[in-house]
Image (spheres, rainbow, N blue to C red):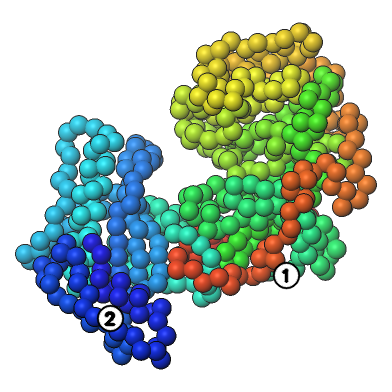
Amino acid sequence: MIDFLSLLCDLRSHVNKESEFSYSWIQPHAGFGTKSSLGIMLAANMPECTPSTTASVEDSEIREKEKKFTVYKVAISSDNDSWFVFRRYNEFYKLFDILRKQVPGIQLKLPGKKLFGNNLDPQFIASRQEGLDMFLQQLMQDKKLLEIPEVRAFLQLDRPKLSSEGDGELEDTTEGVDVCEKLNQLNLGPSERLYAKPRDFEFLRVIGKGSYGKVLLARHCSEGQYYAIKILSKRVILRKNEVRHVMAERDILLKNVHHPFLVGLHYSFQTTDKLYFVLDYVNGGELFFHLQRERTFPESRARFYAGEISLALGYLHSLNIVYRDLKPENILLDAQGHIVLTDFGLSKEVGDLMGVETTHTFCGTPEYLAPEIIRKEPYGRAVDWWCLGAVLYEMLYGLPPFYSRNTSEMYERILNKPLTLRSGTSESARDLLSQLLEKDPRMRLGYAEGDLENLKMHSFFSQINWDDLFAKKVRPPFNPNVHEVFDLRHIDPEFTREAVSSSVARSHSTTSILTASVREADDIFAGFSYAAPMDL
């Protein structure tokens, strides 16, 4: 239902108050109310309007904790502010029950409970969503009901705004305050010190782009040190419900500072509308960039990269972390030619030391997805060894093993098509690929407690001294020959040609947008800011 008074308020706000402005009778649509013949006079001297509060059930989605359940997305707009919350049906029912007891004779209708049948049936969910929206519209028509504390809590009408304005989209307060409470528990302890700020850095070149932001080459103004700074938009993160992934990436990065083949985090900090990861600057290029240029690598070179990647994955697994997104784009080469894994946005910490049957999330890059992920089965760290097999296959043969331009066809191939191993590679290479690209994860090389140690013993790696490899005593087969910081020849020109936006150096957005992604951003991203200990 349209709030007609709010519409008139909006019209009036666009008129110069000193000019003569009047409308004759404005006839509302008959559907707007019973007094359809009522005329409304709008004049320049009419009193200021008070913005109304509106709410609607816009969407629904199925989630899973101990079992699957449905949540409904409630979008709220009030006082030039907008946000959304997710609520389960039981929360609607609890509110309905409270209102019936507090307001005798209340004429609200709520969809009934479903005692039998499938509550996850799409048609049932759509019907229930429509009924919940009707309930909400009835509730919003009675302004007195909006003063009831339980209603205000349900819609989160009393949450404080941030002290400074920000650029954003709608806020996702999924699972009530549970998310905020968990994120607020992040405690940096003695490693925490004064946070960095955008003005501490001179932002020089764009060197990468992703779904949520960009990576820039930057120089610390006082230290003179160069870093790669990953800058993410809070607005996009909140809109796509990726807060957990971002915070998980930060936590995992904190554990990587001592490993030679994982990118290190020096700082993380935030402004009103952005998150900043200050990372090791690596300018030898993505493995993807080099593969595009050379098509395939000699087996000795592929072995070297696969060995260093294996050490990185094995280290993550020792910390109960599944990487989940190994692909050539996430494998960098440093100035000497050693690999550096980056981008831990899809990585997940798991509780099971075996790394088996720990998570169900469907995520990753299609070309490199393990069969168990596509089948939506429980999976663990063995998915990383499948990805290693896919990357090794691509290094040797030029394309991922089951590649197709049609994603559905590619999934079908990954699930059912036998692995094809062409000639031109050694028997040990083909054997390793067949064991890594085993469709049954329980039969896959690296499964269960053996993990990295099983790979080390394979004949393909018989020439490698693993201690020397870890210590970077093995000479890389390819040297990027980068001579200085601004030698960007191995970074895609698509990135480096892009101008650096001045907004990346601002401490807060100067844009005034009537949305509220940052309304609770201080709480949602609490604990994000970090500075490495001084002795590192």
Check the picture and name the quadrant holding the N terminus: bottom left
Please say if 83 is above or below 323. below
Instruction: Report how far apart the C-alphas of labels 2 and 1 lie in the structure.
Output: 51 Å
Q: Residue at x 7, y 66 (%)?
A: 104
Check the picture and name the quadrant holding the C terminus: bottom right
Type of amino acid under label 2:
Tyr
Residue 404: x %, y % from top left: 59, 22
Report the mark closest to the observer, 2 or 1. 2
Q: Quick one: SS at disc 2?
A: strand
Any part of residue 352 in sight? yes
Between 154 and 531, the one lying in front of the other is 154
Looking at marks 2 and 1 on the same chain, the residue that comes earlier in the sequence is marked by 2
Asked where in the image residue 188 lies, by quadrant, the reply is bottom right
Residue 218: x %, y % from top left: 78, 59
Q: Residue at x 69, y 10 (%)?
A: 421
Image-based side of 77 in relation to 103, left or right:
right
Q: Which residue is mark 1?
A: 199
Asked where in the image residue 11 lies, by quadrant, the reply is bottom left
Please say if 435 is above or below 198. above
User: In the rendering, which numbered label is found on residue 23?
Assistant: 2
